Image (cartoon, rainbow, N blue to C red):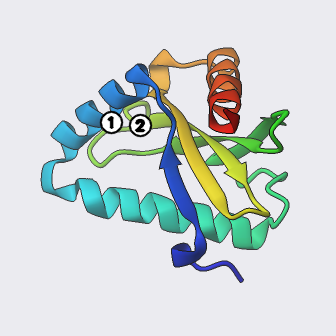
Amino acid sequence: MVELSEIEWELARNADLDQVIAQVRKSLGGGYTANVDALKAFLVAYINSHDECNQRQGVSINPIGSTEGGAKVLKVRWALPGGGRSGGLRLGFLAYCEERKIVLGYGRARRDSNDTTLLEALRIADVELGD
């Protein structure tokens, strides 16, 4: 069983991602840290349920590929408080499950994103992490 404290969490170097995080931080105010903690706990629960990170979890987590660096690409839909059905985020994570490392490499408003852009952004992040 993987514990939250065993996971190494990283953010990819990505100016677009920095903007999304700043917007979310602003909109959530004091609730930002609690929301991030809940998201991390959700991802750890996923890893504990699907140790190879290769199965869907409802509509919230969808593995959509892998990278040359060995990461599983996870598309995660995350609702924001008060955001309604389409007001959440679509996040892209690189999950290095065996290494217990998760990298946030993509983030967009749910209505502004598509899988092709997400996958390409995460493949670039994976290459940069390997440098």
In this view, 19 is above or below 94: above
**Residue that numbered label 1 is attached to:** 21
Name the residue furthest bottom.
1
Location of residue 131 (image quadrant): top right
Q: Amino acid at mark 2?
A: Gly
Per the model, the C-alpha gap separating discs 2 and 1 is 13 Å
Q: Position of residue 21 (x, y in %)?
A: 32, 36
Location of residue 85 (image quadrant): top left
Q: What residue is shown at x 85% (from left), y 33% (from top)?
A: 68
Q: Position of residue 18 (x, y in %)?
A: 35, 30
Q: What residue is shown at x 67% (from left), y 78% (from top)?
A: 2
Relative to 57, is 11 on the left or the right?
left
Q: How many marks?
A: 2
Element at label 1: helix
Q: What residue is shown at x 31% (from left), y 38% (from top)?
A: 83
Location of residue 122 (image quadrant): top right
Element at label 2: loop
In this view, 89 is above or below 99: above
Mark 2 or 1, which is nearer the eye? 1
The quadrant of the image that shows the N terminus is bottom right
* Label 2 close to label 1 by CB (< 8 Å): no
Q: What residue is shown at x 17% (from left), y 38% (from top)?
A: 26
Name the residue furthest front.
131
Of residue 118 and residue 126, the one placed in the foreground of this image is 126
Of residue 47 and residue 102, the one placed in the foreground of this image is 102
**Residue that numbered label 2 is attached to:** 88
Label located before the other in sequence (2 or 1): 1
Q: Position of residue 10 (x, y in %)?
A: 50, 49
Neighbour class for label 2 at 10 Å: few (<14), some, many (≥20)? Answer: some
In this view, 125 is above or below 61: above
Q: Amino acid at mark 1?
A: Ile
